[in-house]
Image (cartoon, grey):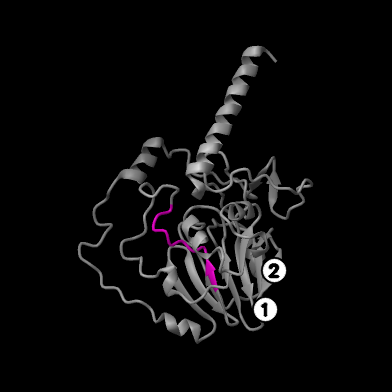
Amino acid sequence: MNNGLSDEVFIFECQLIISNFIIMKFLPQIGFLKSKLENKQNNFNALYENGKFKNRIDTPLRSETFTHKDILNVLFRKEKGRMPQYDISLKLPEIEAFSIYDNCFMWLGHSSIFVRLNGSNFLVDPVFSGVASPFTLIGPKEYKYSHTIIPQSLPEIDCIVVTHNHYDHLDYKTVLYYKDSVKLFIVPLGLSKILKYWGVAEQRIVELDYWQTTTFADVEITATPARHYSQRAFFDKDKTLWMSFVMKTKSNTLFFSGDSGYDIHFKEIGNKFSQFDWAFLECGQ
């Protein structure tokens, strides 16, 4: 290798080290980025090659005709008619009832769901910070009329399930709020490092590969495949897994799709679990 190229590599590595330091120091909400998995055999049920997880079929993030101009339009164009022209009156649900009855579900907006099963309270992909972004002032903000529930108004949460690491599903401020009170965080492969970096104790975290099951309060939670991707920064794409999941009790079976495009895994999940009493499906994926 010639000296010129060696110098370029050295400079590039120094830049990476400095960039990582700045990010970890001033933007902890991005999470721990060195998320290389410790399984040297890579004998996962999920597809894992060259340090990244993969979908079974090619899944481009955008079509070939989608240009940079289109991206800017999506981010900054303000279309008329997308917001109500008058205030909408809101009525809070009777949250106290969710501490009395079992098999209760409450949609909290976007992908966040409150679930009560077997006398325990679960949250799925809770986001309460108001913005799905590492930056407070930049990024997708919650819908004006959706912020009706805050963590303090909910019953005590026993378990949190996170389907993947995108900012609209894994929220830094929400994890900080619950990190010392929630008994268990259930996450897909690779996400435990982010939670531990944010201060969640290792014994409170369970990582799952596809088709692996853990049990909490007599509720079986099984990670199932999804067609999506993961990313929190420019250089960590697909280094952690994404998932759908199934919750099963003696009397009920629930399916949560997470963010998933269509693939044969839906049929595989249906065949394995036969019948669902409730299904919570994302749209527009």
Where residue 178 sits: x, y (%)? 52, 65
Magenta-drawn stretch contains 261: no
Task: Indicate the quadrant where residue 186 lies.
Answer: bottom right
Dominant secondary structure of the magenta stretch? Answer: loop
Front residue (pair 157, 211): 157
Say which residue appears at 64% left-offset and 46% top-offset: 35
Front residue (pair 4, 23): 23
Q: Are marks 1 and 2 in contact (CB under 8 Å)?
A: no
**Is residue 118 something that shows in the picture?**
yes
Q: Which mark is residue 113?
A: none
Q: Quadrant of the N terminus?
A: top right
The residues tagged by marks 1 and 2 sit, at their Cα atoms, a distance apart of 10 Å
Q: Is residue 129 left or right of residue 124?
A: left
> The residue under label 1 is which amino acid type?
Asp
Say which residue appears at 56% left-offset and 52% top-offset: 228
Task: Indicate the quadrant where residue 161 lies.
Answer: bottom right
**Is residue 285 something that shows in the picture?**
no
Mark 1 = which residue?
Answer: 218
Where residue 165 sits: x, y (%)? 55, 53
> The residue under label 2 is which amino acid type?
Thr
* Neighbourhood count class around disc 2 (C-alpha, 10 Å): few under 14, some 14–19, many 20 upward: some
Where residue 145 sits: x, y (%)? 31, 65
Q: Which mark is residue 214?
A: 2
* Neighbourhood count class around disc 1 (C-alpha, 10 Å): few under 14, some 14–19, many 20 upward: some
Q: Residue furthest left?
A: 86
The residue segment tinted magenta is: 122-132
Where residue 253 sits: x, y (%)? 61, 76
- 277 relative to 198, above or below: below
Q: Secondary structure at mark 1?
A: loop
